[in-house]
Structure formats: C-alpha cells, structure tokens
Image (cartoon, coloured by chain):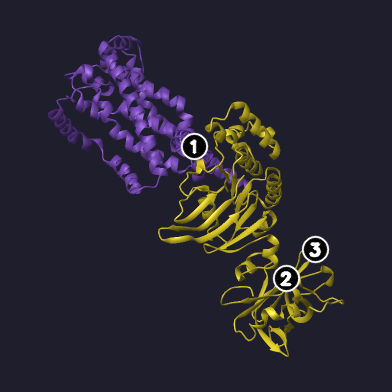
Amino acid sequence: MSASLRRERRSALIWSYVFLVVFAVIFLTPPLYMFITSLKTSAEISAAKLPWWVFHPTLDNYSALLTSETYLTFFRNSAVVSLVVVAITMAISIPAAFSLSRMRFWGSAALATGVFLTYLIPETLLFIPLFKIFAFVQDWTGIELMNHWWILMLVFPTLTVPFCTWIMIGYFASIPKELDEAALIDGAGYLQVLVRIFLPVALPGVIAATIFAFTVSWADFLYPMAFATSADQMVLPAGIVSTLIKGDVFNWGQIMTAALLGAAPPLVIYAFLMDYYIAGLTAGATKG
Amino acid sequence: MAQVTLRNVVKEYDELPAVRGIDLDIADKEFVVLVGPSGCGKTTTLRMIAGLEDITDGEILIGGDIVNDVPPKDRDIAMVFQNYALYPHMTVHENMSFGLRLKKVPNEEIKRRVAAAAGILGIRELLDRKPKQLSGGQRQRVAMGRAIVRNPKVFLFDEPLSNLDAKLRVHMRTEIKKVHQKVRTTTVYVTHDQVEAMTLADRVVVMNGGLIEQVGTPHELYHSPATIFVAGFIGSPAMNLVHCGLEEAAGALRVRLTDEISFPVPAARTVRYRAHAGKAKLLFGLRPEHVTENRAHQTANQIPFEVSVEVTEPMGMETLVFFNLNGAELCARTNPSANVQPSARTTLLADLSNMHLIDQESGRVL
C-alpha cells in the first residue's frame, strides 16, 4: 500500500518536472534569444552564422540606447505615466472596492457587476470611441488631448480601475464583517476602518492590484500607438517600434536591447513583491 | 457603569420580523444572558444594543439616554464576538489598545490600562504576539481584554464560547464569571447554550420567535417556568412532558396519564389547579430528577408507579432511565446502585411536589 503510494507520488513528481522544464524552456527561450541578439553587432546579426552564439560580444547597443535622448525620453514618459496611473488607480479603486464590498446601498450589487463588465470590453473596441471623445472635448474646451504623452495617464485608468476594483472587492469581502464592526465599536470611523484595518489586512490584494496596474500601463501597446504620434511624446513600447524600425530597416540589436531594458523595471518590481503577489493570488483559499 | 433599557423594541428585515417588540430592564452591574434557539432574535437584540443594527421601532436606553440614533462608537460599549474579531495584523497589545489610541488616550495611561487588563486575564506574556500565534482560549482572553481596557458602560458578548472545545468552554465560562465579579460592568451575553445561561447569569432572558418568553433568575426559570417553551428549553435532560387529564373526585384532584397510572395532585396545588379540571389539552410536566428509583421511605407526595424500561444510560453518578408513557418518551434519573435494567418492568417514584401543569392551548404553565 505505502509502496504503491510512494510510486504514485514519484511518478507525479516526475511528470511535474517534465512539464515545468518544457514550460520553462518555452517561456525563457525568447528572452534568452533577445539577450544574445542584444550583444551582437548588426553585421553579425545579418551574417546569421549561428543565431545561438555570440562570436564578438559588444555592449555598443546598450551604450547607444542609454546615451540616446529619444530612448531616455521614452523611458521617462513610461515611468511617469505608470507611476501616476498606479496612484490614480489606487486612489479610485480602494475606496470604490471598500464601499462596494461593505456598504449596502441602492444599486451597489449592480454597480459591482457593472465594474466587472466594463473590464470585459477590450481596448481594441474602445480606442475609436475614445478618439471621438477627445475630438469632442477639444471642440468644446479647446484643450488638445491628442499626441500628448500625459493623456495616457487619463486613458490607462479606464483599463486598470475596473479590474483592480474588482479584485479588491474580492479581497475586502473575504475580511470577516466582525472585524469592521469591532473597529466601529472601538471608535473608528469608516475611513479609519479602511486605512487601519482593511488596507493592512488586505495588503496582498492591494499589492497584486498595484502590480497589475503598473504592468498594464507599462506594457500596453495599442493606446500609446493610437494616441501619441510624435517621437518626443511616446512611451517605451510604441517608441521602440516607431523609432528603431526605419522603413524596412530593422535595427534588431537595438530593438532587442531596448525591449530587454524596458522589461527590467517590471521584473525588478515582481522580484521584490513576488511573495506578496503569490500570497495575494491564493489568499482566502485556505482558512487562516 | 449603566443600566440598559429596551422599550417595545422591534426589528424587521424587509418586513420579516426578527424581534417583535421586547421590553427589558437591565440593572447597573447586572449580568443578563439572552438565550434561545437559533433565529429567536437574541443576537439581533444584542446588535441593536451595540448599534450595529438599526431598530425598526421602539427605544433603547443606555445609562438613561436614548441611543436609537447614536452610532456604535459613541455608545460607550464593548463587544466580544463569536469569532473574536481580533485585528490580525496587530499584536495583542495593539489589539487591546486600538480603541484607546483612537480616543487619543495618553500613552502612559494606555500602557497602565492594558497591563491591568492583561493582569486580570493572565495574558501579560502574550502582549507582543500576533493573533495567529495564539490558541483559541488565548484569543478569547484577548478579545475580552480589548473590551475591558476601554472600561465601557456595557459589555456585550455574542456567543463568545461557541468556537471553543467543550473543556475550554467550561473553563472560560468560569473565567468570564470571575472577570465580571472583578470589574462589575453591566453585561449582556448571548448564547444558545442553556447551561451557559444558567451558570453565568444574574438573570436569564429566554427568547423564542422574536419575543421574550420569560425573564428571571436561573432558579426561577428552572423551578417555575412560565411557558411550555421555557419548561422544555431549560434543563438537560429536558423536562418530561406528557398528555394528561385532570380529574376531580371528592374534593381532591388527580392527574391521569394512562388508564393505569394517575397521580394525586398535592394538596397545596389543589386550589391553583381546580378551575382546570376536566380540560382537554393539558400537559403534565416533571423534571427527570423528580422521577427516581423506588425508595423505602416516601413522603406523601412521592408516588410509586410501574413502567417498562426501554433504555438505560449509565452516566456514572446517575443512570438515566428512559420509558414510554402515553406516547411520550420520558426520562428518570436513578441512583446507579438501584441497578435498573433495560427491557424490564420496574417501579419508579414520582415526586409530585415538583409537578407542573401546562395548558397546551395557551402554552402557559398553570
């Protein structure tokens, strides 16, 4: 009996490793290829002798990008946009999730569902109506919204707020109701309950939402392509594609380097918050 | 320190009545237990006193002031919840001092009060721990400590022991009683466990179906239940209840259970019961401890009768004997040395001086 259990467990382990290795190879090959390519000169890339080996490693691509005014502008625009979007998202989502999960008021259930449905509409359907809205706003107020990098700070929250609100409603709802009642009796107001009880207790959820908001605003491609057209108004994803591909000339070395550097900040943030993130994703799965 | 008064308090959820008009006066320093089956409105009543539920109608007074529209934080109450509701991210000390910190009580004062409460509850060495590092009994103490440090007018307990195992429950019951004897704060305690109610309360409030059935000391409820519900709810094993007839002959009353078995009503009860002679729907009530094994020395009101024993349950200090009479399963508490055997005919002794007569239609004990 116990021998067969052990055998079963071993075969389960073996299969786990087989799949883990397969998926690790599939997912890590592109970044590895990017890294190899980023160390090559254009000549070596076009020679295409052995794509998986670097014969004459060089850091030229890195130095070219890191001294390029345009690339640094993309980087700065991206950073500012992402940080501000995270701040705006949290400022809206946290109170929204708190009230939708805790305060019963007329239409709160419908609102909560509405928040989720909003998220289900893809951005590919939204960017054309958004164009119309920008034009409308410009007609009425004279404020030009197109082709400014900062407009992304207003546009991205339309993607991040619904989703972040939705997942935080889930986290807040998993906090026992007695906890806020105890705090109310202890003398806290609703705002104090939110700040001193809910945020610390639901911290994994808040961090998961933060990472999501950051990733979306850092990596989104469609809206930046659609709404910013001149080089100085671009953020990283759109900027790399627009400036490093000139006509039909692909500067592969720099494209790969730029993409790698661009992927670095989310990677660093993930690494630091990974434990919280995983705790957040599995919170409520077991009884604490 | 304060008295709590409920005047015709009603609570309806979307027209569904949970509490249907209750009046209750709780004296200063009194320990009152609300007890009843689930859904009887006891927790709703407690939450209305706390201010966690709006009241549909009536008035609630704490310390003489109407608090209907006063938010929980301004009612000067403290509550202990069934699941303790400790703040998981705070240490025991932070949990206990949370309310005081919100009120901007000076740090020195907070330290002193937390230390004093921790001393009363024996949790001094736990002050730096987080709730998840505590056992169930310790969490229970911390929850009580959080209530004590605030030195409120009223303590509210919502089934605080039901998450503990049986042994710890009995222990914490004693602890709660000790704490109340030390701090003497007016206490309202909700439980569905009638043993908890009896052991803790100065007065017990038995609730059923959103109404109060009876208010009284544990002794009163046990020995003079006012309604059939209280008679059946208080006491374990429950009071024996069996259909009976009340016959009058030559100025004396007899309670008839079956064709063979009838008991003379004690002379002291004759006047009280006479008007009900011949009534159709009457129940005869007698607690199991008043049905015992047959004894040589009997008083005038102890009447022997013969039954067929169905089951016996030896408990050690006593043996419960179950038998069937007039369609009802009845229980007797016998001395183990009497050695009553199952499936045998045996003679038991009913002590009629403790009998109850219940009008089934009104549900009142006569």
Furthest-front residue in this view:
B64
Determine contact: label 3, label 1, CB under 8 Å: no
**Distance of mark 3 from mark 2, alpha carbons?**
14 Å
Rendering quarter of residue B281 = bottom right
- Name the spot of residue B46 as percent of width and height, x first: 54, 52
- Name the spot of residue A140 as percent of width and height, x first: 14, 30
Rendering quarter of residue B37 = bottom right
Residue tagged by mark 2? Answer: B288
Tell me the element at label 2: helix
Q: Is residue B333 above or below residue B135?
A: below
Kind of residue at badge 2: Pro
**N-term-proximal mark, 3 vs 2:** 2
Which numbered marker is on residue A94?
A: none
Q: Is residue A249 above or below residue A226?
A: above
Which numbered marker is on residue B317?
A: 3
Q: Are marks 2 and 1 on the same chain?
A: no
Question: Which color was chain A given?
Answer: purple
Residue tagged by mark 1? Answer: A188
Q: Are marks 3 and 2 on the same chain?
A: yes
Residue B10 lies left or right of residue A105; in this view the side is: right
Which chain is yellow in the rendering?
B
Kind of residue at badge 3: Met
Can I make out residue B235 in this image? no
**Distance of mark 3 from mark 1, alpha carbons?**
52 Å
Q: Is residue A130 above or below residue B346?
A: above
